[in-house]
Amino acid sequence: MYRCRECQAEYSIKVEYCECGNNTFEYIEDEKKEVPQQPKKQIDRVKQKSELISKGFFAICLIFSVLIILFAGNSTQPKKTKKSTAKKHQVIERKIPNINQIWDDTPIYNPQRQYSEQQTEVINQNTTIPLTSRPVEYPRREQVVTSPTIQKPKKIEQKIPPKVTSAKPDIRQEPPKEEKKVIVKYDPNNPELLEYKSKLRNALFSRLAIGAIQGSGTCIIEFSVNKETGKLENRRFVEQSNNKALNDSIYYMLMSVPRFELPPQSYQGEKFRLKFYLNNGYYEISYI
């Protein structure tokens, strides 16, 4: 602490000038506030009381835990149930039918067995068995198997009505007229052709990566369009620039557009020439 010698004002930090204008100060030590200490006897009593309270709480918890264990043990023991008196079984009398009413002595139908029995009866009636030790050859009965007759379908005769010829006058057929091919002259100012050329230029420009080209240069390309398929043919450079990046981007642009819409009828296979001019971000694309 610093105290002004004239106005006795106190400052925690030494300042150059006091509010009164004095610049001389006295250094004063900070007076520590003494905290009144409690007597030791009162502290011991508080400690004893807290220990008694904690011991009592612990004893109460033990008592509650023992009671809970005893209550749970009694609840888990099975309760003694009274012996249930045996119920009298009710005897149900059921009438069983007589087996003689159900039993059937009729033999199972076996056609082979019946056929063999009939055959042995015929042999016994027609042949006499001699009393010899030699084997006896019995006459074999040959069965003639007749195939069922198949009736052929009858042919249905269709009656064709007679042709009625009507007398018509003779009309001489004239030879077919040859269609005259309409030759359309090339008109560079045709609105359909101009619209087609602008669409084609926009399609090519959409494939040109201008952001990847730096510097300046002028480049001219030439190509034609197939009238039947719309394929870009005879693609070549008429004039290349000194800027390799511009030449490469123009080449990739032509390769990425192999086909386009079919040209109008006024187009007769003429070659299109496009000029590309680039100068540090400024560009121009025009037909020449």
Image (cartoon, grey):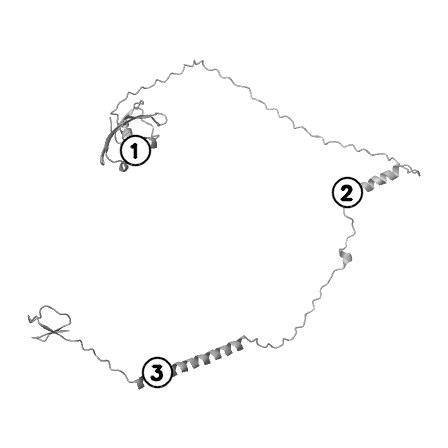
Q: In the depicted view, which residue is nearer to us: 58 or 259?
A: 58
Q: Which quadrant of the rendered structure holds the N terminus?
A: bottom left
The relative height of residue 42 versus residue 92 in the rendered view (above or below) is below
Question: Where residue 197 appears, x then y in whole percent?
Answer: 28, 29
The relative height of residue 142 versus residue 85 in the rendered view (above or below) is above
* Mark 1: secondary structure: helix
* Mark 3: secondary structure: helix
* Mark 2: secondary structure: helix
Q: Which residue is mark 1?
A: 249
Crowd class of label 3 (few under 14; some 14 to 19; many from 20; radius 10 Å)? few
Q: Which quadrant of the rendered structure holds the C terminus?
A: top left
Residue drawn at 50 percent across, 77 percent down: 69
Q: Quadrant of residue 178?
A: top left
Question: Where residue 244 appears, x then y in whole percent?
Answer: 28, 32
Q: Are the residues flagged by discs 1 and 3 in contact, CB closer than 8 Å?
A: no
Question: Where residue 160 appears, x then y in whole percent?
Answer: 57, 22
Q: Which residue is mark 2?
A: 111
Q: Hey, what amino acid is under mark 3?
A: Lys
Q: Which residue is mark 3?
A: 47
Crowd class of label 1 (few under 14; some 14 to 19; many from 20; radius 10 Å)? some
Report the residue that reaches farthest toward the bottom: 41
Q: Are the residues flagged by discs 2 and 3 in contact, CB closer than 8 Å?
A: no
CA gap, disc 1 and disc 3: 92 Å
Mark closer to the observer (1, 2) = 1
Q: Quadrant of residue 227?
A: top left
Label 1 vs 2, first from the N-terminus:
2
Label 2 vs 3, first from the N-terminus:
3
Residue drawn at 53 percent across, 77 percent down: 73
Q: In the depicted view, which residue is nearer to us: 52 or 227?
A: 52
Residue 25 in view of the camera: yes
